[in-house]
Structures are given as structure tokens and as C-alpha cells.
Image (cartoon, grey):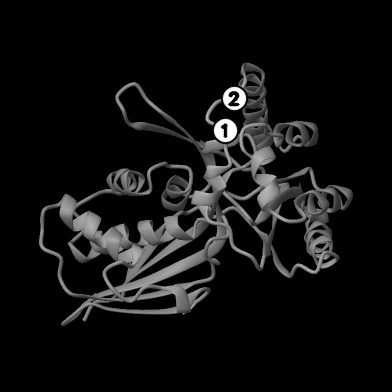
Amino acid sequence: MTIFEVSVPATTGNLGPGFDCLGAALSLYSRFEFTIAERLTITATGEGAGQVERDETNLVYQGIVKLYQHIDRPIPPIALHTDTAIPLSRGLGSSATAIVGGIFGANLLAGSPLDRMQLLDLAIAMEGHPDNVAPAVLGGCQLMASNQNGGWEFCDLQWHDAIAIAVAIPEFELSTAKARQVLPKQVSMGDAIFNASHLALLTHGIQSGKASWLRAGLQDRLHQPYRQSLIVGMENVQTAAIAAGAYGMVISGAGPTLLALAPTDKINNVATAMQQAWQLMEIKSVTKCLVIAKDGTTFINR
């Protein structure tokens, strides 16, 4: 009996001014096992295991359905096991990993009829936007934009080795839908120009490691000012992170996880400062120092 194992990295979307168009894969993983069985069975371990659906509404299984519908084949009965280190509804791409894992696993079960970029297209169609699924599939830090043919262009930004990452994950959840509800329908020309210029600067800062470009480039006016009210203590955590040596701090995806960039020799102090800032407000959090996951989705069979 062949078991296919798919590993998908967590992702952080937006990275400040890169709203819906910039994302990075992080060294925190969801792992999925797939095998042909007599009937559909779903088991789960790891973060949020008790919240994982055990029937056809499971998001990984929906990815399986998407792939088999695309190749126009009947869906076989499958035994699925998920094991994730990525907390649910925290802005670290847990939904994207489930979608990507299901699509990749189904492709392996079907004999790999689609290549990686075709699988990415399916994942984008299912997720609705690419800033989480693209880095999950491709790895690294990805800048993406629609092209004139209705598809997508992906630009792999080479993350400078001197830029370290810390995430502070609070105990409370924040749904993406709620985080999108607070966003304005229109923004001013000034804010649009501000974000365009700062995103351009941030992409160069990420690749060069230049401190002043990172400090300025992480600023945003499109989504973070509106979402800050949904994340208790965000301003305090940001102040603490910068005081400890961070270039800046952003909301990871839709939140509530907060992500700081800092020099490698200061990242542990930054992570500690972020956790302590929330602790002073009696909010429990977990901090992690992570690196960019360069390989994206990987898989083996055994």
C-alpha cells in the first residue's frame, strides 16, 4: 500500500504594504498523508486537531475534490491524515496549506497528471487570491501580479540572509472574513501612491538587507490601520519589537499573529519583547523565530 506524504509550509501574506500581492513561506509545516482505502477516513494530530472536520467538508478533502473534478476522474475512497504545527485562524496560512496539501495529494494519487504550476493555478482558483498559496507551493518570498492574459506572474524575491523573522501568535483567533469586513471600499490617491512606493522599496530591502529601506518599506496605509483595532495590544507589541531592535512589525496575513523583521543577532530579543508586551496586558502568546522556507511544497511516497 503506497502512502503519499505532502509537506506544506506556513505562509505570511501582505508583509505590510504588499496587500494581497506579497507573501513568504515560513519554516512551520503542515504534513498530510494520503492512501487509497476502502472508505473515506480522516484523522488529525497537531494544532487544532479537535477542530478538523472528519467528513467531506474537510478543506483538504475539498482540495482533493477540486483536482479530481479538474482531471474529470471519479474520486477514490481515501484515508487522509493531517498533522500540523500551524495554528488555525491566526494569519499563518493554515487554510492555504490545507488547500495545497489536498490538491498535491490528489495529484499524486492520480499518477501526477499535472505539473507544479498547474497545481498552483488550481489552488489559486480555490483560494481566490494567490498571496498565501503561491509561496506555499513555490517557497521563498513571492511577489505576484495578474498579467494581460488573465493569469499570474510570480517574482521570486531573494530573501537576504541577514533578515531574521519572529512571529508572536496570540491565544485569540481572528477570521479572515472579519478582518476583510473592516477594510474600506475605496482609498485616497495619496494612500495608493504611499503603498505603491513603499512596496517597491520593501522588495529592494528584502533582497539587499538595507536597514533604512526595510524600516520605511514595512509601512502600510491600505489594511493595517483598519485591522489594528481587531488585534488587542498591537501598538504595544510593535513599540516593544522596535525598541528591541526590529526593523518593523506587520500583521501576518489577516492576523492576529504579528510578524517582526530584525537583524539575526537581535531576533531572539525581539521575540521575547513581543511576548512580554502582550503578557503585560494578560494576553498569552507563543513566539517563534523562523526562517524562509525555500522549497515550498514537497512530497514523498513510502
Residue 101 in percent (x, y) is at: 36, 61
Is 21 left or right of 167, judged from the image as shown? left
Between 167 and 285, the one nearer to me in the picture = 285
Residue farthest along the left direction in this orientation: 73
Q: Residues within 10 Å of mark 1 (few under 14, many from 20)?
A: few
Is 232 left or right of 128, judged from the image as shown? right
Residue 187 in percent (x, y) is at: 59, 25
Q: Secondary structure at mark 2?
A: loop
Mark 2 — residue?
A: 187
Tell me how far mark 2 sits from mark 1, CA to CA.
7 Å
Q: Amino acid at mark 2?
A: Val
Between 279 and 184, the one nearer to me in the picture = 184
Q: Is residue 224 above or below residue 216?
A: below
Q: Is residue 294 above or below residue 209?
A: below
Q: Amino acid at mark 1?
A: Pro
Rendered image quadrant of residue 22:
top right
- Give the numbered dot on residue 14: none
Q: Is residue 210 above or below residue 38?
A: above
**Which residue is at a point 41% across and 73% down the rendered structure image?**
52
Q: Residues within 10 Å of mark 2 (few under 14, many from 20)?
A: few
Between 186 and 148, the one nearer to me in the picture = 186
Mark 1 — residue?
A: 184
Q: Secondary structure at mark 1?
A: loop
Do the CB atoms of the residues marked 2 and 1 lie less than 8 Å apart?
A: yes
